[in-house]
Image: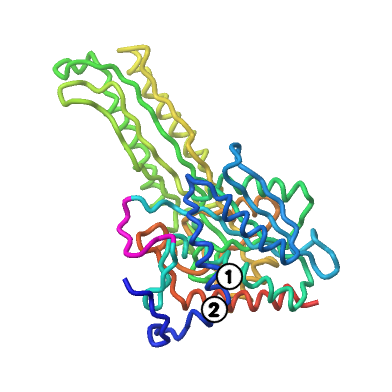
């Protein structure tokens, strides 16, 4: 394949890569293959050196095996203030795998195709971090009136694992920013709330029997289906109820079953069945109340099961948890981000991010970043040059806030 042309007539939106301050930085970050299962230490070391060379103080927090790290970096204000006020710019460093996906270009070599940059993580979410990093010399040239922090995390894609340690360290250091901007892909729209998500596995143990003797068995698949049916009915009630927030694309809380496995042969009453399910809930809905009710229903099934075999059971494993958040849209960080977006509209989304973790740690959060969630996790993941240019305009306006006395 020929080297991609950078010709101006290939970019209908009129943006040329040479116009972008952060273009080479995006290519550099994408070239670190930081799939969640692998180490991110090379990327972290490179960014740390880059920021320290520009005068930042940095702190690392590691996973238990020290294969992955979060980076928290601070560029102090001209006055020396490194802790009070200012902004946190936050991004996760990990990306989802490319295994089995039909890519037309090397996913770890960001490649311009027409007016779109292709590569793993260009949307989710290395471009925001790269553009922010590339703007540091500009922020310093203007002179920071308040501190600027970078929070780069590991293992976001597998459940926002790394950010917990980073945030605990920031809180312990007494750093109190005005707020936090998380650069997940929102099409550069301001997002001030997202749903929470909790996930579980349910394991049903029945009692095996010949299928001609079903009353002597306990059919784990059918018990699991009773539970699935209960969850499905609860989902209908949530859909048809009154606890809606029309600001979301899906304006109500949604339970969902994603995986079910059970049985071995049609002529055997199955002994085991397991299924995995989630609830994506509006921030004001309580996922634990849903789960408590489900457990009550499960308990109501046990006497009939145990009358056949006292060893039967229904058990639940908690898999993951991501809180929701809603910052209300009327606080300083929302005002700053609104001004930087150049749009007064604030949106709410159904996917989770690290924003809720910052928000719940007294760092009010908003989400705004280039690209669209529909392109995330896809083969040929791409971001348009126009989105990158919008992100750079955002950074220009953020410089006015950060550098204004
Ligand atoms: Zn992401």
Dominant secondary structure, magenta: loop
Camera-side residue: 394 or 68?
68
Q: Residues within 10 Å of mark 2 (few under 14, many from 20)?
A: some
Contact check, label 2 and label 1, Cβ < 8 Å: yes
Q: Residues within 10 Å of mark 1 (few under 14, many from 20)?
A: many
Identify the image quadrant of the C terminus. Answer: bottom right
Q: Is residue 344 visible?
A: no
SS assignment at label 2: loop
Residue visible at 56% across and 63% down in the picture: 183
Camera-side residue: 18 or 122?
18
Residue visible at 16% across and 19% down in the picture: 211
- In this rendering, is residue 308 above or below 233? above
Nearest to N terminus: mark 2 or mark 1:
2
Residue visible at 63% across and 60% down in the picture: 47
Residue 246 image position (x, y, % from top left): 47, 63
The question of residue 103 being in magenta is answered with yes
Question: Is residue 327 shown left or right of residue 187?
Answer: right
Question: Which residue is the site of mark 2?
Answer: 20
- The picture quadrant where one finds residue 311 is top left
Residue 37 image position (x, y, % from top left): 47, 44
SS assignment at label 1: helix
Residue 241 image position (x, y, % from top left): 42, 51
Q: Which residues are magenta?
A: 100-108
Q: Is mark 1 within 8 Å of ligand 1?
A: no
Question: Which residue is the site of mark 1?
Answer: 131
Residue visible at 34% across and 31% down in the picture: 274
Question: Is residue 107 shown left or right of residue 320?
Answer: left
Disc 2 from disc 1: Cα separation:
9 Å
Q: Is residue 271 visible?
A: yes
């Amino acid at each position: 394949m020929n080297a991609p042309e950078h010709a101006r007539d290939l970019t209908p939106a009129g943006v040329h890569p040479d116009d972008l301050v952060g273009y080479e930085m995006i290519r550099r970050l994408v070239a670190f293959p930081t799939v969640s299962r692998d180490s991110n230490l090379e990327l972290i070391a490179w960014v740390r050196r880059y920021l320290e060379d520009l005068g930042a103080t940095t702190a690392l927090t590691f996973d238990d095996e020290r294969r992955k790290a979060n980076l928290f970096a601070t560029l102090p204000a001209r006055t020396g203030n490194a802790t009070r006020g200012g902004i946190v710019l936050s991004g996760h460093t990990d990306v989802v795998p490319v295994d089995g996906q039909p890519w037309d270009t090397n996913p770890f070599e960001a490649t311009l195709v027409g007016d779109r940059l292709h590569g793993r993580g260009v949307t989710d979410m290395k471009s925001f971090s790269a553009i922010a990093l590339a703007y540091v010399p500009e922020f310093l040239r203007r002179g920071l009136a308040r501190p600027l922090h970078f929070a780069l995390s590991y293992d976001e894609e597998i459940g926002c694992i790394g950010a917990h340690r980073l945030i605990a360290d920031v809180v312990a250091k007494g750093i109190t920013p005005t707020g936090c901007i998380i650069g997940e892909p929102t099409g550069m729209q301001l997002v001030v709330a997202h749903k929470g998500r909790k996930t579980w596995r349910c394991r049903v143990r029945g009692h095996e029997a010949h299928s001609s003797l079903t009353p002597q068995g306990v059919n784990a698949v059918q018990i699991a289906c009773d539970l699935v049916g209960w969850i499905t009915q609860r989902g209908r009630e949530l859909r048809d109820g009154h606890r809606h927030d029309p600001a979301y694309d899906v304006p109500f809380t949604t339970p969902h079953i994603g995986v079910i496995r059970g049985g071995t042969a049609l002529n055997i009453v199955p002994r085991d069945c397991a299924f995995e399910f989630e609830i994506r809930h509006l921030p004001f809905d309580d996922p634990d109340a849903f789960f408590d009710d489900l457990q009550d229903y499960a308990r109501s099934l046990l006497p009939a099961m145990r009358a056949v075999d006292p060893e039967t059971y229904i058990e639940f494993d908690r898999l993951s948890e991501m809180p929701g958040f809603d910052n209300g849209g009327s606080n300083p960080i929302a005002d700053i981000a609104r001004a930087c977006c150049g749009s007064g509209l604030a949106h709410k989304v159904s996917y989770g991010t690290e924003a809720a973790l910052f928000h719940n740690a007294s760092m009010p959060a908003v989400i705004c970043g280039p690209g669209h969630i529909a392109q995330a996790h896809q083969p040929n993941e791409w971001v348009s040059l126009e989105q990158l240019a919008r992100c750079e305009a955002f950074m220009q306006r953020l410089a006015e806030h950060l550098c204004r006395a």
